[in-house]
Amino acid sequence: MMGILRSPIARLALLTLVSALASAQDDPKPFDCHITIGDNQYDLTKVAGEHTVSREISVPPSTIKDEVTFNLCADLERKSDVPSEDQCPPGTRACLVRTNRKDGHSDRVFSVIPLANSSADAVTYSSLSSPKGLDLTFAGPSYPSAVNADPIPQFFHLRLLCSPEPEPSSINFTSYDGKDLRLEWKAVAGCPFGGPKEDEEKPGEGGDSGSGGDKEESVGSGLGYFFLILLLAFVAYFGLGAYYNYSTYGATGTDLIPHRDFWREVPYMLRDVASHLCSAIRPRQASRGGYIAV
């Protein structure tokens, strides 16, 4: 083995394998657009694809256009008709491009800010109750600040509200303060599924009918457990009894049945009980018609 490792080719192959395994372990798992919060599940693939929304800020004599493009479920695609320096780096899921516009001059891109990356570890979320929806936050890399010397971490926030309409509404560009960009959107992807329905009564609600249903279910499950235990007891009784008769007396066939004479008498005992009950009932039925024959 040591002789093989002395070969330069073998050492190179080993180093390549080790580096490949290390990179595979370090490679973060991408966010797959499927979210589970308690009993509720969300499928964001319903709004997959690239979406763009913009706003304009008047700063005379210029106008600043903020345009954000995002894809919740995949990395943004590179555009062949846009210069590379005017696009966010690969592995970005939300990108903000800030452009300065001035009459008589060409538009000038002065900031390209990656807001969110693809790692599932960079995504946090929480459910909204009123109105129903989902609050998503994607963490992005730091971006140089024009005010401070230290770069500022970027965050992409999406307030995805539940909408029964099959087509999503227009996206609302809420704000951007140099650190947090916030959008609001109404779409069916913001509606949870898999949890209890709204029209279903919660435990403890619904008055007497709800408590009665719980009692019936409890009684039914109790009887089921009783008969199950009874069946298991019979199986254990016959199994252990047969093993005892076989190991002790070398019994075979019907002789393996424990207390065989008792079980042979069971049909006759049941017949006697039925006969006794019938004889006890018949006189009462005859007495209803008047006299009893002597």
Image: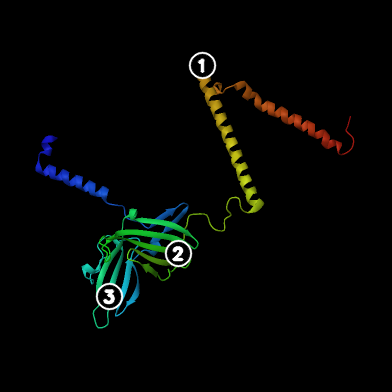
**Kind of residue at disc 3:** Asn
Camera-near label (3 vs 1) is 3
Q: Amino acid at mark 2?
A: Leu
Question: Would residue 228 be seen by someone viewing this image from the given angle?
Answer: yes
Checking the image for residue 161, the label placed there is: 2
Q: Nearer the viewer, mark 2 or mark 3?
A: 3
Question: Is residue 76 among the parts visible in the rendering?
Answer: no
Q: Position of residue 168 (x, y in %)?
A: 42, 68
Crowd tier of the residue under label 2, counting other residues whose Cα lies within 10 Å: few below 14, some 14–19, many 20 or above: many
Dots 2, 1 in contact, CB < 8 A: no
Query: In which quadrant of the rendered view does residue 43 lie?
Result: bottom left
Percent position of residue 28, x then y: 29, 52
Badge 3: residue crowd in 10 Å (few <14, some 14–19, many ≥20): some
Disc on the earlier residue, 2 or 1: 2
Of the numbered discs 3 and 1, the one sitting upstream in the chain is 3
Q: Is residue 151 left or right of residue 272?
A: left
Image vertical order of residue 60 relative to residue 242, above or below: below
- Residue 162: give x, y in percent of width and height: 46, 63
Secondary element at image label 3: strand
The residue to which callout 1 is attached is: 248
Rounded to the nearest angstrom, the CA distance separating label 3 from label 1 is 99 Å
In this rendering, is residue 211 above or below 173? above
Of the residues under marks 2 and 3, which one precedes in the sequence? 3
242 with respect to 180 (left or right): right
Q: Which mark is residue 100?
A: 3
